[in-house]
Image (tube, rainbow, N blue to C red):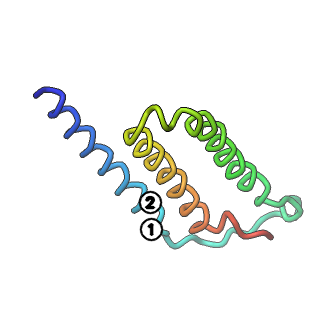
Amino acid sequence: MLLNFYSAVALAALLIFGLALLAAALWRPKLKKLKLPDAWKQYRFGFPTFALIFLAFDMEMIFMYPWAVVFRGIGLEAFLDMLVFIAILLAGLAYAWRIGGLEWE
């Protein structure tokens, strides 16, 4: 009985966290254009963004390979856990896409 209560609380927390990520990905405030000094005009800000996105999806593969090996033995719970993991990564990708992090300069 107590386990069912904790699972309901965990599900509600996961739902709230997912909705907060979705709101952060869809909401885009109006930003002012900054005038950069001449020294900063040669620096490309796209490189660090691409590096972070690459690291995020590289970490996804590091977690998915062992999961794929033991998936048959673990069952449906492991599948649902991986769906949540992929959904969080896709929310991060949607956020990066929304703020223009995937546009090459």
Residue 65 point in image, percent of width and height: 63, 38
Closer to us: 36 or 2: 2
Closer to us: 61 or 20: 61
Task: Return the residue at label 1.
Answer: 27
Residue 73 point in image, percent of width and height: 46, 32
Label 1: state its secondary structure.
loop
Closer to us: 81 or 74: 74
For the N terminus, the quadrant is top left
Q: Is residue 15 above or below residue 27?
A: above
Q: Residue at x 36, y 48 (%)?
A: 17
Closer to us: 69 or 101: 69
Taking 63 as reference, is 23 left or right?
Answer: left
Q: Residue at x 69, y 48 (%)?
A: 52
Task: Return the residue at label 2.
Answer: 24
Residue placed farthest to the top in the image?
2
Q: Is residue 14 above or below residue 22?
A: above
* Label of residue 85 in the image: none
Q: Residues within 10 Å of mark 2 (few under 14, many from 20)?
A: some
Taking 12 as reference, is 55 left or right?
Answer: right
Q: Residue at x 60, y 61 (%)?
A: 96
Residue 62 point in image, percent of width and height: 66, 37
Tags 2 and 1 in contact by the CB under 8 Å rule? yes
> Label 1 amino acid?
Trp
Residue placed farthest to the front in the image?
72
